[in-house]
Image (cartoon, coloured by chain):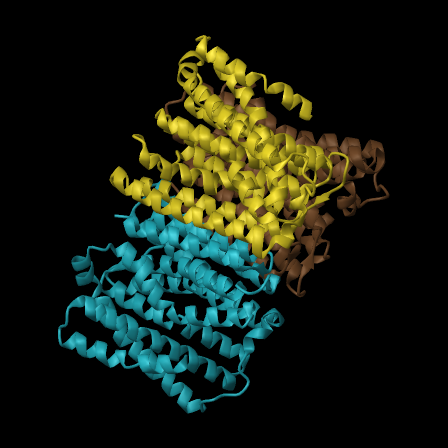
Chain colours: A cyan, B yellow, C brown
Amino acid sequence: MNKIFLGLLIFAPVAIIAEFAHVSPSWVFFLAAIAIIPLAKYIGEATEELSVYTGPALGGVLNATFGNATELIIGIFAIQKGLVEVVKASITGSIIGNLLLVLGMAMFFGGWKKKTQTFNKTASMASAATLLLAVIALVVPAIFLQTAPESGSRIIEELSIAVAILMIIVYCAHLWFTLYTHKHLYAAEVGKEEANWSKAKSITILLIATLAVAWVSEILVGSIEPLIAKLGWTELFIGVVVVAIIGNAAEHTSAVTMAIKNKMDLALQVSIGSATQIVMFVAPVLVLVSLFFHDRMNLVFNTFELIAIVLSVLIANLVVEDGESNWLEGLQLMMAYAIMAVAFFFHP
Amino acid sequence: MNKIFLGLLIFAPVAIIAEFAHVSPSWVFFLAAIAIIPLAKYIGEATEELSVYTGPALGGVLNATFGNATELIIGIFAIQKGLVEVVKASITGSIIGNLLLVLGMAMFFGGWKKKTQTFNKTASMASAATLLLAVIALVVPAIFLQTAPESGSRIIEELSIAVAILMIIVYCAHLWFTLYTHKHLYAAEVGKEEANWSKAKSITILLIATLAVAWVSEILVGSIEPLIAKLGWTELFIGVVVVAIIGNAAEHTSAVTMAIKNKMDLALQVSIGSATQIVMFVAPVLVLVSLFFHDRMNLVFNTFELIAIVLSVLIANLVVEDGESNWLEGLQLMMAYAIMAVAFFFHP
Amino acid sequence: MNKIFLGLLIFAPVAIIAEFAHVSPSWVFFLAAIAIIPLAKYIGEATEELSVYTGPALGGVLNATFGNATELIIGIFAIQKGLVEVVKASITGSIIGNLLLVLGMAMFFGGWKKKTQTFNKTASMASAATLLLAVIALVVPAIFLQTAPESGSRIIEELSIAVAILMIIVYCAHLWFTLYTHKHLYAAEVGKEEANWSKAKSITILLIATLAVAWVSEILVGSIEPLIAKLGWTELFIGVVVVAIIGNAAEHTSAVTMAIKNKMDLALQVSIGSATQIVMFVAPVLVLVSLFFHDRMNLVFNTFELIAIVLSVLIANLVVEDGESNWLEGLQLMMAYAIMAVAFFFHP
């Protein structure tokens, strides 16, 4: 597995060269997309190694922060280019992708040969409530705009900022709950006890991989607009399906692997945890960061994205809340994703 | 009980004669409606007898298929007559009728003299997730049309076909789960061990009853349009309340009987299982079958029907998911049905 | 604690004098608002004392009725003044205030130094189902109007009356469940065994406090319109946030106190029970009472209020349904309230 990722690293320089050689945008997009996958994986690995030295608490914070580094970096470049709708679409895609596709595949393959797999209920209920709160945080501004369409974009912006700040507070509180007051629920997470890499090596890899992701992300984002023009796909589809799958490839692999090893608690933390981080941390941070750019990002998602998010959270919560899973539940989540992906593909 | 159904059989020839005698459409509708009830019952009984010979697995498939034979046949005749909205309304009615009225009455009468009744949680969670997936399958096309109203009916049709196929896959997977990988959860279902009828008798009754249902259904559907013109009721009300109650009369009787005998697992399988079959099997099959007719059926339900379905699924899932029921929960479901039926009656 | 409430009683005469002295409406509103808090508290206490003499069953009925006396009285005066939108807004506010702010603070402060707090699951599921039914009762008329906007106000009124009657039936059934058939689940509630006040004293205080609440409420409501004109706040914000907080101040104090004493069952009964009573009893009674006034109240809430109620019920049910709580769940509810309050403040 690790060798594959090592091999994929070659795509990073290839993508950079292709960009300078003015290769067609589809190729640049494709190469950059693949190049991001191993880089994201190495950011993850370096953070994990580092957490052995820092201890679990600080390690958890590092993990939560760098785990979203890729999405954050792609998001910032895209906002800078004015692709605010692509950013929102990729946030939608990350949420539904993690809750339906990643979690679904984990439950399906993990549960294939078993009757049921179990996981900690209290921990999953805490995530479920956070996800529902995220739904509230996204639904309220959207309904606000729908019921008061005459309200200026300034009010929507102020509301978005206020909601973003409240979301970050909840995210920090959830982190505090996970890493401090209720860490016994998440004991399984600690995982690594001995580092394979030295402290210096970990930090170096973390820095290099993050910089490389930044570079490749800029190339990726730069190729989106010509790609849209060429393929005729919509920003919505590229954001929701394509960018989201790339950004979460690493989570995908590890969640399924863990589920097959019957470590469902870890699989849930990766998939649901990832969705939670995107919506409660990456999205509000991007709203605040966008204040420094020309194009502001607000929290008003379009109705179709919003309904997709609401439905994903409802079905994921339903499947998770009894603390058990089986292959059928996994398949149900995957099919929910398929229905949505088809609809996003057809959506004009 | 069985004698009543035997007696009701007389209504089948009476309805057919009334039709040929050009009696007023209200009478034809009424006679045909009653005639269907015992015929549906005999289809059910013959399938059950047959399953003793085929073994539980194939018996389960037979049961699931012929259990919806009535609805499917009525649906096909109605689509042929161009009454696509009545068909959709009767699907809505079957779902909310089974989830609220049938399940509600079962829990109410079953729980009247008892503190609580219990049932298998894992099995009911699997149904709950399937129902929520059904909601997704119906909400996505509707929201698609609302957010992209300019998209042609061709795109909606293609989306409906894609979603219908995915729904049938999930339905088959659920059947596989029920009859094969997790059949231990449904052990209670097997029920009959000794057949009362010979194999030949079972098959004969099954065929005759199915043909009779087909004939009477055609008469019933033919009388709907004149009936609407005469009574001033809407297609929506006839479909949601009247046709749905007729089509589910047999389920109704057996679910309440089982609940009173404290066999809640069976009562749930009949009521929730019936709703699941209608939405995950009958509805998509009708979409696909309608491709051979002049009037196509898509999966876009009107907003009012859709909200009724969503709310029914949410409250049914809430009541079911703790594995216990009592009379109050039954009453709550019945009242939810009453609120909706009143609204459908007033709805223009 | 009790001394504070005793001291606050002075605000009742002060508010009445201020009204007669034609002090500015903001002051009158403020004084009347504070005056209601201790009066509501004394109505509660007198009912509790009285229930020692009447026995728990009749006591429960008294409690449930007089517990909402304040809201009912304010509501009737406001309808009489034609402030129907303020009444609806204050119903919305009571529901989201009790489910998010009161319950959230109880869980937060109650769970601060503990890992988890537990409460009876069957009882909380019964409330959850009642709340979801309330959502159905409010969503159906609203969607009715949206999908049939041409239907006259007469049909909406008839639908509202029908739904209101069904809601009152469910409320009475829930009371019957609580006080009679399943009273063992609520044993903790009985509480008081010995009365501190004589029967006569209890009745006298109950009557005086109720009359005083009526008087002060009329003053409060009378000052709303000039206040709106002066401060520029909307009816929606005053109703949802300001009036609702005043009307529920007593519940607030007692729920948090009980939670800190680890009596979570009582804290839930106060907060969720209060929300249930408002929506299933006060709201429909006001609809029926309004038939005797010039301005009728229907059950069609505006979309923004409705979504706020739906989301509050969903997150409160999610948090409650596992029978456990912790500080994070409390914070999540409080943050959900904060998001909504901010949105209601900005909403035009």
Give the residue at x 57% y 54%. Answer: B180
Q: Nearer the viewer, residue A134 or A308?
A: A308
Instruction: Locate residue B36: give its quadrant.
Output: top right
Residue A179 picture location, percent across and down = 56, 72
Give the residue at x 41% y 79%. Answer: A1
- Residue C97 visible, this angle: no
Give the residue at x 67% y 33%. Answer: B256
Can you name the residue that lies furthest to the left here? A22
User: Residue C333, relative to residue A179: is it above or below?
Assistant: above
User: Residue A220, relative to residue C289: is it above or below?
Assistant: below
- Residue B282 visible, this angle: yes
Residue C270 picture location, percent across and down = 67, 45
Q: Nearer the viewer, residue C151 or A223?
A: A223
User: Residue B135, relative to residue A91: is it above or below?
Assistant: above
Residue B130 picture location, percent across and down = 51, 48
Q: Describe residue C10's horizontal placement relative to residue B210 as left or right.
A: right
Q: Nearer the viewer, residue C216 or A57?
A: A57
Q: Nearer the viewer, residue A133 or C34?
A: A133
How many marks can you see?
0
Give the residue at x 40% y 70%. Answer: A68
Residue C302 picture location, percent across and down = 44, 35
Q: Describe residue A272's horizontal placement relative to residue C167 as left or right.
A: left
Q: Describe residue A17's horizontal placement relative to residue A246 as left or right.
A: left
